[in-house]
Image: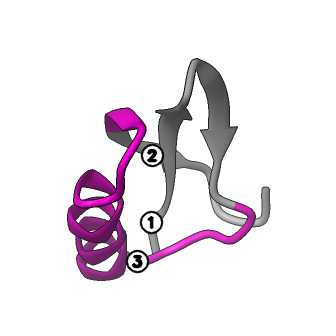
Amino acid sequence: MQNYRVTWTLNGESKRSGVAYDLASAEGRKVRLEQEAGVADVEIVSEKPGV
């Protein structure tokens, strides 16, 4: 199973999700983050399992 994390910038500070998601969940998280004030550069990044 492939895991994904979500990265974004919040008010100029880089952030990264603390949990790994499946692709559908990562996409949902991306959509929710993009609607928050001060959030920019939201990306889904692939991650090796077990990391």
Q: Earlier in the sequence, mark 3 or mark 1?
A: 1
Residue 34 in picture, x, y percent from top left: 25, 53
Mark 3 neighbour class, 10 Å CA radius: few under 14, some 14 to 19, many 20 or more:
few
Residue 4 in picture, x, y percent from top left: 47, 59
Position of 2 with respect to 15 (left or right) is left
Position of 3 with respect to 15 (left or right) is left
Element type where label 1 sits in the image: loop
Q: Residue 22: which disc?
A: 3
- Name which residue type carries label 2: Ser
> Distance from label 3 to label 1 (Cα)?
7 Å
How many marks can you see?
Answer: 3
Q: Residue at x 23, y 60 (%)?
A: 35
> Distance from label 3 to label 2 (Cα)?
10 Å
Q: Earlier in the sequence, mark 2 or mark 1?
A: 1
Residue 29 in picture, x, y percent from top left: 36, 71
Which residue lies under the disc numbered 1? 2
- Name which residue type carries label 1: Gln
